[in-house]
Amino acid sequence: MRLGVLDIGSNTVHLLLVDAHPGARPVPFASHKRPLSLVAYLDRAGNITESGQRELVSFVREAWRFAVQHNAEDMLAFCTSAIRESTNGEAVLARVKREAGVELQELSGPEEATMTVVAVRRWYGWGAGTVLDLDIGGGSFEMAMARDEQPEVAVSVPLGAGRLTREWLPQDPPSAGSVKDLRNHIRTTLEPAIKQFDGLGVPDLVAGTSKTFRSLARITGAAPSAAGPYVRRELRRNDLSLWTQRLVAMPVEDRVHLPGVSRVRAPQLLAGAMVAEAAMEMFDVDTLLICPWALREGLILKRFDHLLYDSDAPVRPVGTALVQKALQPASANGNVKP
């Protein structure tokens, strides 16, 4: 069957159509996206502005038409930190449902981390042992560790690359003082989150998911995307530290010309590198692997699991757009309930 996955993120809004069936890997069929940074539409009170809401509704309508034109049979539609943390997020979701006919499921940070580590586990298999996944988004940073498929700990902190760039690095290139202040902020924020992983032991495999990690790996020498998803790609902390120092002195216009760095992502590359470097240091990780699958694939795989094993999980017509039974509940402290 053909499944649509509508992802309303902090940097882009993206519809991915995949062909798959229960027990099979999802194969991308078509994609439709727009570089819509919702965090750029926040007013001083933290509300998504009228113009931002109109842009969002417009894209969701486009996505719905695109899915129908390409014969999608079902759709998962979700949003992450950009709407989750906005002051008027609930009203925005209601407006999208009313004007575009699509109901967006608001994912919590721990839910994002949980579904992403599911994708990592499926990609690397049981032979990978205990997995630690790190995922840097535009608004938040997710961490999860799993011995099995569901993580023992799944945590989200407000250290997204877009958010930090906007709030801490307003100059181009940034001042030495702002970089120092951001380093301190990242470590202060990470410390209590990483303490939640105490007692879980040393992971057998550490994965980095998200566009930020892929871009960082690419500028440090990893293979380009054209080489295909099965090429092993690594990000080494020593290389990352060297490039973080270079990025501090590099204006955005120069970053655009780095391999694997888009114009949309270039402004926030330094902040993403600083988060990645701090996390790898504090988790004592020398090298991590770049996983091709992340949140979208985790939701797709869990959706097909329920189609396979749950007779009460019918295919929904495109337009209802609900994330159905794909998420395990998470407790308030981020630890996933059994």
Image (cartoon, helix red, strand yellow):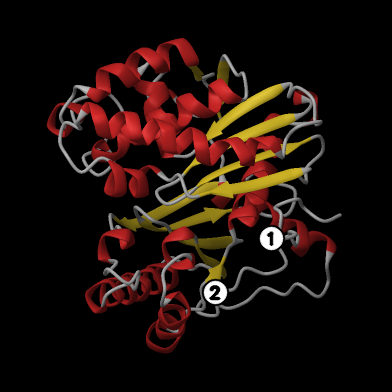
Residue 321: name its quadrant. bottom right
| Residue at numbered disc 2 | 321
Q: State left or right for residue 107 relative to residue 251.
A: right
Can you say whether 19 is above or below 278 in the image? below
* Residue 258: x %, y % from top left: 24, 24
| Residue at numbered disc 1 | 303
Residue 267: name its quadrant. top left
Q: Earlier in the sequence, mark 2 or mark 1?
A: 1
* Residue 55: x %, y % from top left: 26, 71
> Which of the image's four quarters has the C terminus?
bottom right
* Residue 29: x %, y % from top left: 46, 51
- Judging depth in this view, the residue of 331 and 58 nearest the camera is 331
Q: State left or right for residue 313 relative to residue 7.
A: right
Label 1: which secondary element: helix
Can you say whether 168 is above or below 272 in the image? below
Q: Which residue does the image show at 33% across and 28% down from the upper left? A: 180
Structural crowding at the residue carrying mark 1, measured as other residues with C-alpha within 10 Å and reported as few (<14), some (14–19) or many (≥20): many
